[in-house]
Structures are given as C-alpha cells and as structure tokens.
Image: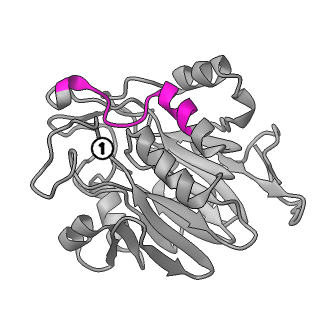
Amino acid sequence: MWTCDTSPSARLTPEHKQFGVTVIGGPTTVLDVAGHRLLCDPTFDPPGDYGYLVKMHGPAVAIEAVGDVDAVLLSHDLHPDNFDHSGRDFALSTPLILTPTTSARRLGPPAQGRSVWESWDLHDMTITAVPARHGPADGELDDDGFVNCEVTGFVIEAPGAPKTYISGDNASLTLVRDIYDRFGAMDCAILFAGAASVHTKFDGRPLSLTSERAVAATEILDAQHVIVAHQHGWQHFGHDAEDTRRAFADAGLTDRLCSAPLGHQCELTSDNCPDPQRHVS
C-alpha cells in the first residue's frame, strides 16, 4: 500500500528520490522512480506569445533544479505548450527521449519512438506507450491519421515502485478504459486536466481532460493517488487547480488528490520500503 501524507512538501532539488512527482508548470513534471529521474514534456521558456498559444507563467523552479535525468518522456513534439524552445534544447541534451514514432522521426537521436502498447526497458523500469487522443472522438484526422497529432501516454512499472499512468494530452475516457483493461488499477495517475482548447480547433472543444473527466479517469483506473498537471501557466487552459479541487470534492475523492504546490515534490511511501529521510506531501 502506497501512502501520501499531509506533511509540508519539499521543493524540487537535483537529488533523486525513491518515488516522487513534481509538477513544474504546464505539463512539465519530474518523476523519480526507484532512484531514477524522468522528465515529462519539458517547457522552460519564460512567458511569451507563440502565435496561437500564449504562455503566461514560467516554470516554478529553474531548470538547474531538475539536474540530470535518465530520460525525457515526450507525449508529442508539435505543440509549444508541451515542448517549447528551452524544453527542446534540454531534451536533446539528455541521453534518451521516449516519444511516439512520428515525433521520433522528426527529432532524430536521442529520441526513440514506440507505437501503442510497445515498451522501452530502462534500467529496472518498463515504460509502455499507451493510447491517447488529443481531442474529441469525431475530430478531423491529420495526415498521419491522428486527431490533432499523434500523442502518447505512458505506464511506468518498476519493482518496489507505484504503478504509474501519465495521460499526456488525452481527452478520451474510452482509451483510459482500454488502459485499465490491460494494466489494471493504478497506484498513481498523473493527469493532464486543464481542459485545453483552441477556438480554431474542433469548435473549441477540449483537447485534454477536463476536471470532471479527470475524476472519471481516476474512478476508471481506481487510481489511489492523483497528481493533476497541464492546468497552469497557459492562456488556453479552461480549468485550473481550484476547478480540480472542486470536482474531486464533489465526487468524494479529495483524499486521492495530491496537491503539492508547483515546484514541490509529492512523495509516496510504502510500508514495505520506508524511508525516514523523505519529506512527504
């Protein structure tokens, strides 16, 4: 059983934890698993206008706080709110980028692409690419056959670590059910749930999970601990942390929501591997 207590959380440092999750801003999340550090969807630019997207806030911690990473988990490479200029530079300097096949072709080394349900083996971790749909089910397909663009989620499994799902920019609960059917219940879920939308795409309908759909995803996955990302820092997010808190409270699932401040680590501990040095949130 993995637990998450209410002690004040520590700010992110380059030190790797046994298991910890830190949302830096937007989708950018640092995930420590079994002492290894993963970085999801790096965005480190200052506020700025990207033409059709506007970044309103920079990262909650400096890029130096991330330190060395074993791999970048990149859900997709085409949108600056998931992969901005500084994030791209950082990712390409790391040993490995795990990403969809179309993204890997565009990026080149060190990117390694996988199709849905295929896996990477990294140290003692198995990281599986899982399906995601970046918009409504009836959304127009791009030239590669995807809604908006190819996006992947990830399921991370490692001995002595919580089984963890990262949604990426997925808007589909049907796909969440498919993931549950294959992997079973999740110990931890990192959900991109800012109800992202752009008025020129799909009549402004959500391109990622809404707060309410994040609750539904939690219930489908039977996820015991949930961290919500991709709901802060960009103008096109329709839901924020307060919407998330309200939705989880309405569903009676507040106890599953880990709400460490941006830049602070949410750490899970297990009775099987206690670590008295941890600061838990």
Position above or below: 251 against 274: above
Query: Residue lying furthest front in this view?
Result: 181
| Front residue (pair 70, 116) | 116
Q: Is residue 216 left or right of residue 91?
A: right
Which residue is drawn at the image coordinates 65% and 52% (left, top)? Answer: 185
Position above or below: 181 against 200: below
Q: Is residue 65 visible?
A: no
* Residue that label 1 marks: 134
Dot 1 crowding, Cα within 10 Å, few <14, some 14–19, many 20+: many
Q: Looking at the picture, how far across and down is residue 141, in whole percent?
A: 15, 46
Which residue is drawn at the image coordinates 67% and 35% (left, top)? Answer: 257
What is the quadrant of the C terminus in the image? Answer: top right
Which residue is drawn at the image coordinates 66% and 71% (left, top)? Answer: 158
- Is most of the magenta stretch helix, strand or loop? helix
Asked whether 214 falls inside the magenta stretch, the response is yes
Q: Is residue 192 left or right of residue 90?
A: right
Q: Looking at the picture, how far across and down is residue 26, in whole percent?
A: 42, 41
Q: Is residue 228 left or right of residue 95?
A: right
Q: Is residue 97 visible?
A: yes
Which residue is drawn at the image coordinates 86% and 66% (left, top)? Answer: 273
Q: Which amino acid does the dot numbered 1 rest on?
A: His
What is the quadrant of the N terminus in the image? Answer: bottom right
The image shows a total of numbered marks equal to 1
Q: Looking at the picture, how far across and down is residue 260, in whole percent?
A: 66, 38
Q: Is residue 55 left or right of residue 201?
A: right
Image quadrant of residue 209? Answer: top left
Position above or below: 14 against 211: below
Image quadrant of residue 172? Answer: top left
Q: Secondary structure at mark 1?
A: loop
Q: Which residues are magenta?
A: 203-217
Q: Looking at the picture, how far across and down is residue 145, in whole percent?
A: 16, 54
Asked whether 274 falls inside the magenta stretch, the response is no
